[in-house]
Amino acid sequence: MLPRRALSTLLAATLLPIATRAAAPLQIVATIAQIGDLASRIAAERAQVGSLIGEGVDPHTYRPTRADVATLRRADLVLANGLRLEAQLDELLTALAREKPVLRLAERLPAERLLAHPEFPGKYDPHVWNDVGLWRELVVVVRDELVRLDPAAASGFAERARAYEAELAALDAYVRGVLASVPPDRRVLVSAHDAFGYFGRAYGFEVIGIQGLSTESEAGLAEIERIVRLLVDRRIQAVFVESSVSERHVLALVEGAAARGHTVRIGGQLFSDAMGAPGTYEGTYVGMIDHNATVIARALGGTAPPRGWRGRLALAS
């Protein structure tokens, strides 16, 4: 039998790693940067948050690397969008869910709040972040999961979640205000793919995407011709490219309209499926939405501050 002092020393040595692990920050991996930004705002110093799919990268077609798989396996929590946004990751996420918490956040929203897929019954549009009010509802989902994993930090999670919800409410009010300044007959958003359905529903815009909900769907010549005729017939003045999607179809619209005697300009580049560069204002969810609303409003005849809601936009339009 060990002496009492030796036993105490052994117990201390055994318990030390447990105490260290308990105090260590959670390791959180998000699939897209919008989710990573949300998690970071709530978790703060209680977690290390990384995102797999970054600036200018299309999540619809993204395939995980071996390094991604290793990163995901080390995570305490994996946060995904779901609704088939990360189609090439679905099988891996399903396998990981047998080992650790994997939350597909958009799938936590009530089905009645989701937009139905136009081609596949029972499927939904995954681009929920383009409605700020809808995205705000996911703050509580992330907060509750963080509390479950790290209950000692619950009060901090709750406080930061409340602050972020208030910030998103103020952002939503700005977006509604500047977009309401666009003349009603000009509230038509034409972009590279159909990523802005939730935006259109929330803010009163008709939305036309050259490609479908996924960039894996290819636009045919007949669809491009149809949209060109619409641009000409309705005298639409501007169309938009996207940071994570090829601009070639949008340029084809501009050229097609010009051939019919109607001038259409590129109204600006929008962040649809990916945010801006890490470390920039546009590389945050708030900055991404501020940029999009400001660029759209100014390009379509509305009024918005050249540098956006907070005067921090790098690119005036």
Image (spheres, grey):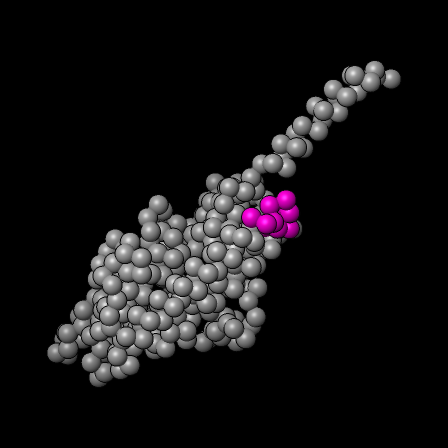
103 left or right of 32 in image: right
Question: In what quadrant of the picture does the C terminus appear?
Answer: bottom left
Q: Is residue 222 visible?
A: no
- The stretch drawn in magenta includes residue 211: no
* Count of picture labels: 0
**Residue at the extreme bottom:** 233
Residue 172 vertical position relative to residue 259 in the rendered view, above or below? above
x, y percent for residue 303: 24, 70
Q: Residue at x 49, y 75 (%)?
A: 116
Residue 184 vertical position relative to residue 279 in the rendered view, above or below? below
Q: Residue at x 28, y 68 (%)?
A: 296
- Magenta range is 146-156
Which residue is nearer to you in this view: 141 or 262?
Answer: 141
Which residue is nearer to you in this view: 1 or 227?
Answer: 1
**Residue at the extreme right:** 1
Q: Residue at x 20, y 80 (%)?
A: 235
**Residue at the extreme left:** 261
Residue 22 vertical position relative to residue 240 in the rendered view, above or below? above
278 left or right of 97 in image: left
x, y percent for residue 142: 55, 55
Q: Residue at x 55, y 67 (%)?
A: 109
